[in-house]
Structures are given as C-alpha cells and as structure tokens.
Amino acid sequence: MSQTYRVGIIGCGGMGKSHASTYTQNPATRLVAAMDIRPESAKKTG
C-alpha cells in the first residue's frame, strides 16, 4: 500500500528551497504549499 504525503514549506530561504527540491524528487510526497514573509520567495519556491 503506497501512500502520498502532502507537504508545505514555511520559510523559503536556502533551507526551504533545499527541502522543496527534495520533496519534489520523492514520488511519495507532493508539495502543495509554500509560505514566506516575502511573497516573491514563496512564489519562486512553489
């Protein structure tokens, strides 16, 4: 039984981008949200 996990990123700086990259490469996860104090950073990461 395979399960897909929906994940969100809070903070889209260097570490957030690293996590987002890892999540998008993993078939068991789906990146569904990105949030940052700077909207342009969140949009770029998402």
Image (cartoon, grey):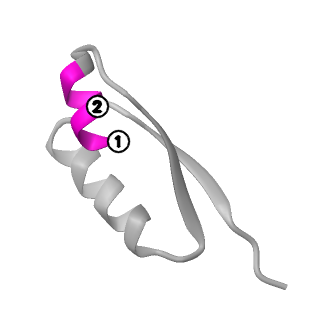
Q: Amino acid at mark 2?
A: Lys
Query: Residue 39: x and y, percent?
Result: 26, 18
Quadrant (top left, top right, bottom left, bottom right) of the N terminus: bottom right
Q: Secondary structure at mark 2?
A: helix
Q: Is residue 41 magenta?
A: yes
Residue on which the image places disc 1: 46
Q: Which residues are magenta?
A: 40-46
Q: Which corner quadrant of the image does residue 16 belong to?
A: top left
Q: Which corner quadrant of the image does residue 10 belong to?
A: top left
Judge left or right: residue 4 versus residue 22.
Answer: right
Quadrant (top left, top right, bottom left, bottom right) of the C terminus: top left
Regarding residue 12, the answer to whether it shows in the image is no
Label pair 2/1, CB-CB below 8 angstroms: yes
In the image, residue 3 sits, relative to residue 43, either above or below, namely below
- Residue at the image point whose x is 27% and y is 42% from the top: 45
- Residue at the image point whose x is 28% and y is 31% from the top: 43
Residue on which the image places disc 2: 43
